[in-house]
Image: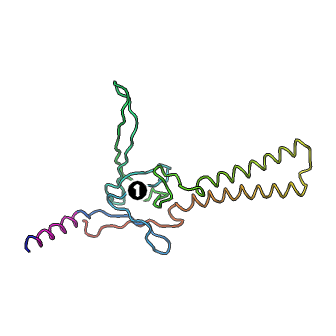
Amino acid sequence: MRIFLLSIFLLLTVASAKSQDDFIVLKKRNNRTLKTYGQGSFLSARTNTGFQLNGFITAIRNDSIFIRQQETKLVSTEFGQTIDTVFHTFGFDHRNISAFYFSRQYDAVMRKRGFVQTTLPAILIAGGAGFMALELINTAYRKEPLNDRKKLTSLGIAAGVAGTGILLQTLNSRKDKVGNKYKVYYIKNARRK
């Protein structure tokens, strides 16, 4: 029994010593926690300067996040080519992050998944703008009046389709930004001195 209690005590001591880092919490406006980032968590985000972050957090302390990214690429050698993996570890202030990609709507290279998020807005914009351009070019070529009721209706519908595509793109890009749908809270560990 003593050995069992001693092993539990040592396990709890090691666990409390391991949890000495701070952590970052993303919360919705209604104070609901969306995601918590700590040491060992995978972070996928974009900074204010547009730099894309993809890597594991090695430490969080003093308002800074230290992240380890890896890059796998083809490298030339004297015997041909080989695949090499390079690891980069760097730190930055957590307030420099402008967007967190924490939901499942992103793939490994931070492109949005799904037809509605990626393909549909582009199709709507291209279709609406293309139809308007083609209609205006044909009207000028045939020397027809532009104020014909059928032409104005079809141009209005095409403008609405293109506008819907632009609106979908704007709404999809706005929902990831810090401050719009969620806030970032830096939680300092009280036990660390």
The residue furthest left is 2
Q: Can you identify the residue that label 1 sits on?
A: 43
Q: Residue at x 45, y 69 (%)?
A: 27
Occupied quadrant, residue 12: bottom left
What range of the chain is rendered magenta? 4-17
Please state if 189 lies on the left or on the right of 123 as rendered: left
Give the vertical position of 70 relative to 167 (above or below): above
Count the marks: 1
Q: Residue at x 21, y 64 (%)?
A: 17
Element type at mark 1: strand
Q: Position of residue 92 (x, y in %)?
A: 39, 53
Q: Is residue 14 magenta?
A: yes
Q: Position of residue 55 (x, y in %)?
A: 38, 51
Callout 1 amino acid: Leu
Occupied quadrant, residue 93: bottom left
Q: Is residue 41 magenta?
A: no
Q: Quadrant of the C terminus?
A: bottom left
Q: Position of residue 153 (x, y in %)?
A: 84, 58
Q: Residue at x 37, y 45 (%)?
A: 70
Main SS, magenta residues: helix
